[in-house]
Each structure stands twice: as structure tokens, then as C-alpha cells.
């Protein structure tokens, strides 16, 4: 449809960092279908590129008003709230995105990073575990989970995730070394 073409051209302009060009085509698409939650997400993403967090927040809220199950809109809203200083609301928004779509890598990646930064480990670990249960393998997010388990001194869980990574990628010498160190610490009774 013409709507999809305009929206796609807007997306291309965003990738080219031509934000004015993107806005022009998004508004052409909006004139044809103002009730597209996906278009509102695109407009919110455009505002993120401009670092206009208040307008971005409003765009993502509009998208959620049209479709409360849009996990990408929840992620965008989380980013806006985070940059506007409402950390608790940002975490709640990310949690909603992960509940809707545990395979949303962006949501899970943000949850892991923010969880470490703000010492909200249980939320981050839960999101990572839900994601890894949904996808066949994601080495980067498995490594993030190992890191969080180590920060919490939950070394037995870290060892389980190390084993999983090594099954997929047996060439990770660094993980064999970490596995040995953690096993020795557990054997010596230095940790759980």
C-alpha cells in the first residue's frame, strides 16, 4: 500500500540520519493512516534520534493507546522515561515489553545493562532467562547473564550458563578459565 511505502521510505531516511526527510514521509503516511501503532513507534524513534524525550514519550504512549501489546512501543517508552529520569517507570515499561515478547532482544539488553547499573539484578536475570528460553542461542546475552550471576555470587548458576555457551561455542578459552576458577572457589567453600 502507499501507506507502507511512505512508512518504509521514512525508515530508510532514519537509517541515513536524514531526520527531516524521515519526518516528511512519516507525516505522509500519517495522513493516510493516523491509527497505525507502528507508525507512532516510528515517530517516537525519530524523536529519540533527535533526543526530544518528552515528544518521544508522547508518541510511544499514542502507539500504546492504539495497541497495548506493542512491545517495541513499551521499549521506546522505557527509553524516554529513563532519559527523563524516571528509572522505576522505565524498568516497569521494560518489564511489560519482556512480558509481551521475551524474545525482544533490545528490551532484554537494556534490562541487563540498566539492571547492572542500578543494581536491579533479579529483574535483569529474569528477563535474560526468559529471553534465552525463547531463542536457540544468544552468546552475548548468555555472557551478560553469567556476569550478573557472578556479581550476585551465584556461581553455580553462572557455571550452568557457562556450560551452555561452551556447548554452542567450544572455542571460548576465556570461559574454560572462568569455569575452572569458579569451580575451584565452590570446591574451596568460598562461595555458593
Image (cartoon, helix red, strand yellow):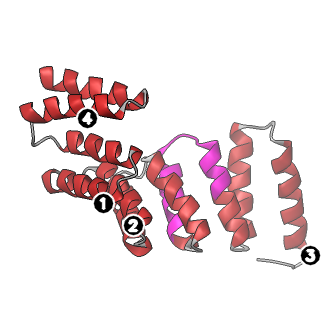
> Which span is picked out in magenta?
123-144
Q: Which residue is labeled 3 in the image?
A: 188
Report the side of 103 relative to 67 (left or right).
Answer: right
**Residue 81 vs residue 192, the one in the foreground:** 81
Q: Which residue is labeled 2 in the image?
A: 84
Q: Does the stretch in magenta take in 109? A: no
Closer to viewer: mark 3 or mark 4: 4
Rounded to the nearest whole Å, what is the CA distance between mark 1 and mark 3?
53 Å
Q: Which residue is labeled 4 in the image?
A: 23
Asked whether residue 68 appears in the rendered view, the answer is: no
Asked whether residue 110 appears in the rendered view, the answer is: yes
Rounded to the nearest whole Å, what is the CA distance between mark 3 and mark 4?
61 Å
Contact between labelled residues 4 and 2, with CB atoms less than 8 Å apart = no
Element type where label 1 sits in the image: helix
Q: Position of residue 152 (x, y in %)?
A: 68, 74
**Between discs 3 and 4, the one toward the N terminus:** 4
Q: Position of residue 172 (x, y in %)?
A: 80, 41
**Residue 163 vs residue 57, the one in the foreground:** 57
Amino acid at each position: 500500500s502507499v501507506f507502507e511505502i511512505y512508512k518504509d521510505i521514512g525508515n530508510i531516511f532514519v537509517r541515513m540520519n536524514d531526520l527531516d526527510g524521515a519526518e516528511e514521509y512519516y507525516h505522509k503516511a500519517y495522513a493516510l493512516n493516523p491509527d497505525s501503532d507502528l507508525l507512532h513507534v516510528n515517530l517516537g524513534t525519530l524523536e529519540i534520534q533527535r533526543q526530544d524525550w518528552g515528544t518521544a514519550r508522547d508518541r510511544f504512549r499514542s502507539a500504546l493507546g492504539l495497541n497495548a501489546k506493542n512491545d517495541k512501543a513499551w521499549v521506546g517508552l522505557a527509553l524516554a522515561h529513563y532519559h527523563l529520569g524516571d528509572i522505576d517507570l522505565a524498568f516497569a515499561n521494560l518489564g511489560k515489553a519482556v512480558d509481551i515478547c521475551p524474545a525482544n532482544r533490545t528490551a532484554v539488553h537494556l534490562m541487563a545493562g540498566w539492571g547492572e547499573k542500578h543494581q536491579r539484578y533479579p529483574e535483569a536475570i529474569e528477563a535474560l532467562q526468559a529471553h534465552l528460553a525463547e531463542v536457540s542461542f544468544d552468546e552475548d546475552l548468555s555472557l551478560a547473564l553469567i556476569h550478573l550471576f557472578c556479581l550476585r555470587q551465584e556461581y553455580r548458576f553462572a557455571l550452568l550458563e557457562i556450560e551452555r555457551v561452551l556447548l554452542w561455542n567450544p572455542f571460548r578459552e576465556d570461559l574454560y578459565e572462568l569455569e575452572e576458577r569458579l569451580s575451584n572457589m565452590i570446591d574451596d567453600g568460598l562461595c555458593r
